[in-house]
Image (cartoon, rainbow, N blue to C red):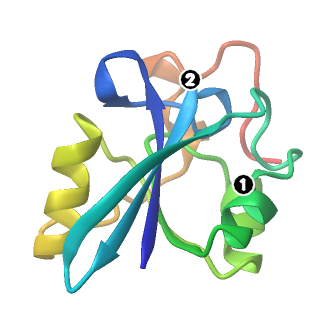
Amino acid sequence: MKIAVPTKEGNQIDNHFGHCEFYSIFTVEKNLVVNKQTLESPQGCGCKSNIAYDLAKMDVSIMLAGGIGDGAINKLSSQGIEVIRNCKGDVNELVDEFLKGTLKDGGASCSAHAEKGHDEGHVCNH
C-alpha cells in the first residue's frame, strides 16, 4: 500500500492539497513504513492538475489531506485513491495514526474552512 500526504516545510501536512510544496509518498508493507519518497507538486488547483493520475501510476491508494475540495476528491476517487480529510500535524505521525487505525476522516471539504486561511482567492468547491 502507498499513502500520499501533501507536505510543506517542517514535515507538516499542507492545509491545502493543491498548493503543497510536495507530496510525501509512504510505502507500507505489513503495516510498517518501508520507504518514504517525495513527488514534486504541480502547484495549483488539485482538481485541474494531473496529480491524481501521477499518484495512481505510483500505486497510491490513500491520500491523507488537510483542506481539499470536492473536485480534487472526485478526481482522486476516480483513480481509486481514498481521501481522509482535515488531517493536521506532522506527516510521519499522521501515517502512524492511520496505520494504527486511529486517524478518521474529518468530514467537510476545503470550502468549509475559509476562515482558517484556505480562501486565498480560490474557491475549492468546483
Q: Could you say which is closer to the camera, residue 16 or residue 97?
A: 97
Identify the image quadrant of residue 49: top right
Which residue matches tag 2? 118
Does residue 107 appear to the left or right of 100 in the view shown?
right
Q: Is residue 25 above or below residue 39?
A: below
The reply to whether callout 1 and callout 2 are in contact (CB within 8 Å) is no
Q: Is residue 102 above or below residue 72?
A: below
Residue 30: horizontal and vertical position, in percent?
21, 86
Residue located at (27% from left, 66% from top): 34
Specify the amino acid type for callout 2: His
Which residue matches tag 1? 72
Specify the amino acid type for callout 1: Ala
Residue 113: horizontal and vertical position, in percent?
48, 32
Residue located at (45% from left, 70% from top): 2
Residue located at (16% from left, 47% from top): 93
Q: Could you say which is closer to the camera, residue 76 or residue 104?
A: 76
Residue 4: horizontal and vertical position, in percent?
48, 56
User: Which of labels 1 and 2 is toward the front?
Assistant: 1
- How crowded is the residue under tag 1: few (<14 C-alpha within 10 Å), some, or many (20+)? many
